[in-house]
């Protein structure tokens, strides 16, 4: 079964280009992130169709409870506000101070990730790490993060409509050819 993991920061929420570390430490920062409505809509549609089409969907986000102490509670509040129908099991927070996304998912699955585990993320380091551990990496271009086109592989873009994103993700789920290598 294909498993889709969608990053939160910079994919489901806006990415703030001029943000400093001090901003992330402030109470209210994570809760104030505006949703990326097209991707949020595509996620909701995927959640509605996943059971009947035979795949699973999960939001996968890193938190840093030591450094950004409000990140856990505020991401949960953001989820409750914008994704109230999401089950706890469909919203996985990875302690980024202790592990990478692939390791957290391997613990969750009870085994290694593979090409059927698709990560949609805006951050190249997460995508490379995911790919090196056997998963399929898909770059979400958010308008700020891809000036040099430094990622080689499948892409989705912030300027795609909800419908285009939904259809592109479904196409990735049901395509049999292997994904290009992440660079």
Image (cartoon, grey):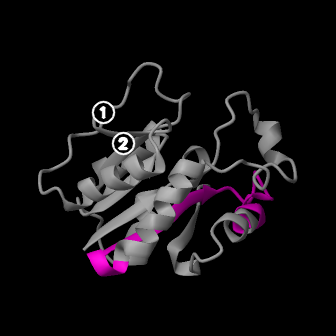
Question: Label 2's element?
Answer: helix
Mark 2 — residue? 128
178 left or right, relative to 20: left
Q: Position of residue 161 (x, y in %)?
A: 46, 44
- Residue span colored magenta: 51-76
Image quarter of residue 75: bottom right
Q: Position of residue 38 (x, y in %)?
A: 53, 49
Res 100 seen here:
no
Residue in the image at 77% along x and 44% along y:
24
Task: Tell me whether the residue at label 2 lies in contact with that at label 1, contact meaning CB atoms closer than 8 angstroms.
Answer: yes
Answer whether residue 61 is magenta in the image: yes
Q: Position of residue 86 (x, y in %)?
A: 57, 75
Question: Label 1's element?
Answer: loop
Q: Which circle's residue, 2 or 1, is located before the other in the chain?
A: 2
Mark 1 — residue? 183
Q: Using the image as rendered, state which of residue 84 and residue 58 is in the foreground.
A: 84
Mark 2 nearby-residue class (10 Å; few <14, some 14–19, many ≥20): some
**Which quadrant would the N terminus be assigned to in this image?**
bottom left
Res 63 seen here:
yes
Label 2 – label 1 distance at C-alpha: 7 Å
* Residue most extreme to the left: 177
Q: Position of residue 65 (x, y in %)?
A: 73, 60
Residue in the image at 47% along x and 20% along y:
147
């Amino acid at each position: 079964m294909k498993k889709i993991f969608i990053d939160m920061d910079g994919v489901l929420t806006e990415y703030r280009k001029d943000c400093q570390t001090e901003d992330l430490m402030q109470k209210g920062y994570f809760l104030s992130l505006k949703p990326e409505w097209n991707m949020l809509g595509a996620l909701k549609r995927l959640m509605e169709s996943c059971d009947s089409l035979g795949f699973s969907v999960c939001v996968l986000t890193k938190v840093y409870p030591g450094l950004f102490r409000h990140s856990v509670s505020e991401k949960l509040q953001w989820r409750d506000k914008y994704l109230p129908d999401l089950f706890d099991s469909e919203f996985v927070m990875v302690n980024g101070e202790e592990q990478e996304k692939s390791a957290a998912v391997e613990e969750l699955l009870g085994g290694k990730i593979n090409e059927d585990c698709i990560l949609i993320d805006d951050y190249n380091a997460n995508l490379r790490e995911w790919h090196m551990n056997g998963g399929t990496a898909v770059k979400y271009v958010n308008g700020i993060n891809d000036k040099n086109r430094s990622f080689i592989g499948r892409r989705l873009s912030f300027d795609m409509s909800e419908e285009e994103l939904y259809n592109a993700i479904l196409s990735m789920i049901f395509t049999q050819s292997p994904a290009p290598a992440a660079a």
